[in-house]
Amino acid sequence: MITTAIALLAFQGARLPENPSFDYSGLPQLRTAEKVDFQTHSVTLEIGGVREGYVDVSTTTVLKNTTDATIRATLIIPRRRLGDPNSGQPTFDISATWDKKPLKLTPASDHGYSETVGKVVKYSSDLSTKVILSAGSTYALKINYQVLLGKGGYEQKQRLAGYLFDGDKTIAQLNIVYRYTNKTVFRLPEMHPNLGWQIGEKGAFVREENYWPDNQLTYLSFYPGGF
């Protein structure tokens, strides 16, 4: 029997397998003191469906300026990695549009950030840009990126994919789905943390109302097909 040691990392409700190694992004953050509503945030993680061994991620966030004044804000898009001391900062490409117009993303800091938790290093090299929200207007932010399917667990035989929810604004409606196929996943995957996931042979889905994103890393772990 294969046993997996479990390491507790500093994420709400997330207990990751040992030796995790994977890239991920997460909920975009809007740096502004003014009132902006996150009306919906929908995330789809396609595992091995477009390119074997990769995760294709697409998100749509609908935001509304509920004030009677124009808001100029900084948009932050997370770009993260969990790995070992030799992993280095994540460098995967992220594309985004704001109200159907392409955004030019630049590094949010010059050198990125890293934090060691036990034997695992958490890396951050977030991207940022400036956006404008007219008074009373609604905007759609669309984000796309592709990352390698992660590894972890005993001899890194497990496969991992994740998405981070962190921020300071309630999401009125949150939808997230992990899609996979029988050829990709051996048996059904494990979903973390426990959010009431609906898990089937083609994917795992959860919907939350008035969700508060409190540094919560969602992820699935599985053994690959043919294991």
Image: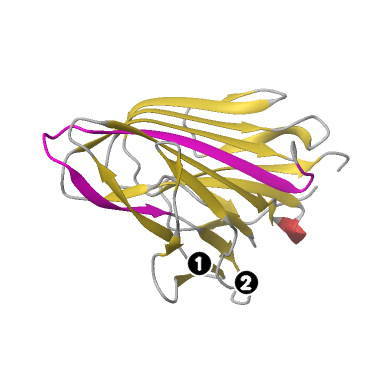
Question: What's under tag 1, amino acid-wise?
Answer: Tyr
Q: Hey, which residue is sitting farthest right in the picture?
A: 226
Residue 197 seen in this snapshot: no
For residue 174, which quarter of the picture? top left
Q: Nearer the viewer, residue 84 or 66?
A: 66
Q: Position of residue 51 (x, y in %)?
A: 77, 44
Q: Nearer the viewer, residue 159 or 79?
A: 79
Q: Position of residue 148 (x, y in %)?
A: 69, 53
Question: What's under tag 2, amino acid-wise?
Answer: Ser
Q: Position of residue 17 (x, y in %)?
A: 62, 54
**Residue located at (62% from left, 71% from top):** 87
Q: Is residue 143 above or below residue 204?
A: below
Q: Hey, which residue is sitting farthest left in the picture?
A: 68
**Residue located at (60% from left, 59% from top):** 92
Magenta region: 51-77
Q: Does residue 6 appear to the left or right of 223 in the view shown?
A: left
Crowd class of label 2 (few under 14; some 14 to 19; many from 20; radius 10 Å): some
Residue 113 magenta-highlighted: no
Q: Position of residue 130 (x, y in %)?
A: 32, 54
**Residue located at (50% from left, 67% from top):** 123
For residue 112, which quarter of the picture? bottom left
Task: State the residue position of label 1.
Answer: 123
- Distance from disc 1 to disc 2, alpha carbons, whole Å, reads 9 Å
Q: Is residue 218 above or below residue 6?
A: above
Residue 143 seen in this snapshot: yes
User: Cβ–Cβ below 8 Å for labels 1 and 2?
Assistant: yes
Task: State the residue position of label 2.
Answer: 87
Crowd class of label 1 (few under 14; some 14 to 19; many from 20; radius 10 Å): many
Where does the C terminus fall, quadrant-wise?
Answer: top right
**Residue located at (25% from left, 51% from top):** 73
Q: Does residue 165 appear to the left or right of 191 in the view shown?
A: left
